[in-house]
Image (cartoon, rainbow, N blue to C red):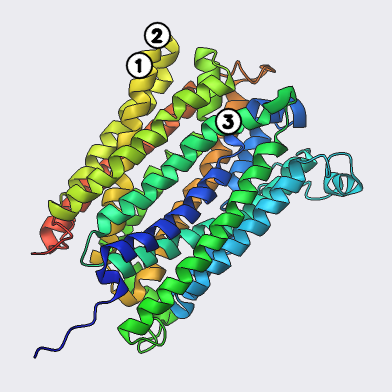
Amino acid sequence: MKEKVQQKLSDSAAWRWTALTLLASAMFFSYIFMDVLSPLKDILQTNLGWDSTAFGRYAGSETFLNVFVFFLIIAGIILDKMGVRFTAILSGVVMLVGGSINYYAVSDLFLGSSFEQIMNGILNIPSAWWNVTPFYEGMPASAKLSAIGFMFFGCGVEMAGITVSRGIVKWFKGKEMAMAMGVEMALARVGVAVVMVGSPFLASFSGEVSVSRPVAFSVFLMLVGLISFIVYSVMDRKLEQQMGESGEEKDDPFKISDLKYILGSKVFWIVALLCVLYYSAIFPFQKYAINMLQCNLGYTAEKAGLVFSVFPLGAAAVTPFLGNFLDRKGKGASMLILGAVLMIACHLSFAFLVPMTQSAFITLLSIVLLGISFSLVPAALWPSVPKLVDNRLLGSAYAVIFWIQNIGLYSFPMIIGSVLTATNQGVEDPLKFNYTVPMIIFASLGVFAFFLGLWLKVENKKHGYGLEEPNIKG
């Protein structure tokens, strides 16, 4: 009589997709908070005195600690040493703390308080070339404190990002890994759609405009996300027990010196630079997209949010299918090139065609194509990383990529805010800004990404990394 082979939880489709649901739900809630103030740029300027420069500094502050204190590198080491469970729960707690600070900063509890006076008197750093901080002299106190809260949130959300990626690899390696990553990112995109529509609605709910109302709701959702991480941790512990592991990678622990194997890889750097270019042209753009549509087409925040929600919803719909295609057919490097071409076309359309034609059709078409472009990135890019580095170094590899990505996510919201201010001198109405130059800047990032994609394809053909091959073998 043959002995039955005990199946692991990850061998069961139901259990591994349940694990993915828990991980993706937490990221869904964090993405809602990440852009909760993005559709409210005009209200922030009118009610709280945040001009484009202050808004850009706030938007960029999310990644400040990750970039300049190297927190993401530290997070990767924590992940490799402590494992997915510990790091997931820690990231959930940090996000919740940061979100709570952010809520306090824009609430009536802070406005007019003695603490607001304290914040007015500190962090007044001259606006000189060496000032790489999110703070500057004359920045509104609420924007300063919001930036501090966003810094903490940024540490947590990026830590969660590398942890979720590592968790998906753990549960889906050799199975539907690209599709799983695509589904996780698709759900995150839905979070962006929800907040683009929901944030203006909640802000104006009951007739009284309040930016703190949508922030409070999103903080509550992050608490639910933390609970999701805790439930996932119970499942993850059971999986490790079945695998006969007392902990992750304890037989071959991570060492700082191992980073040389990551940083010494040319193809790794190509992938990392592709990542920073793609994401710098998308996430900072999301911060300004609603105001851009308001200025170019005369839309209200509610209507602009509804129109722009097509972008993340389209990305959410397409990403799992692209992931499934990559799992079964491959062509990852080719998809990255196509994504860059679409990105260039869409941002140039926002720069010239949309303001010139005032066409709702061209606007929607550009938003849909940009969503498809962005779908190609998570579906093709993230599943490529395990093909380039050893599994033991995977957490640190993701951390290094995310750190490089964060340099762009930190700098470009501030660059765009400063460019908006510089190119709209004398324009007081936040609904009358000219967005031509910012859109050209975003398009230029797509041009660089296109050439890097071509280079990646050449390197893959030369060295056989398998980036064009399917993830599911046999």
Mark seen at residue 39? 3
Q: Which secondary structure lies at badge 1?
A: helix
Nearest the viewer among 80 and 306 is 306
Is residue 447 shown to the viewer in this render? no
Circle 2 packing at 10 Å, graded few (<14), some (14-19), many (20+), is few
**Mark 2 or mark 1, which is nearer the start of the sequence?**
2
The image position of residue 121, as x and y in percent, is 86, 47
Q: Amino acid at mark 2?
A: Thr
Q: Do labels 1 and 2 touch, CB within 8 Å?
A: yes
Q: Residue at x 42, y 27 (%)?
A: 440
The image position of residue 302, as x and y in percent, is 56, 23
Please identify the residue farthest to the front as the structure is shown: 1
Nearest the viewer among 242 and 116 is 242
Q: Do labels 2 and 3 touch, CB within 8 Å?
A: no
Query: Gap between marks 2 and 3, in whole Å?
Result: 23 Å
Query: Gap between marks 1 and 2, in whole Å?
Result: 8 Å
Q: Nearer the viewer, mark 1 or mark 2?
A: 1
- Residue position for label 2: 357
- Residue position for label 1: 362
Query: Gap between marks 3 and 1, in whole Å?
Result: 21 Å
Q: Residue at x 55, y 37 (%)?
A: 415
**Quadrant, the C terminus:** bottom left
Circle 3 packing at 10 Å, graded few (<14), some (14-19), many (20+), is many
Q: Amino acid at mark 3?
A: Pro
Is residue 252 shown to the viewer in this render? yes
Q: Quadrant of residue 205?
A: top right
Q: Amino acid at mark 1?
A: Ile
Q: Quadrant of residue 235?
A: bottom left
Tell me: residue 474, above or below residue 82: above
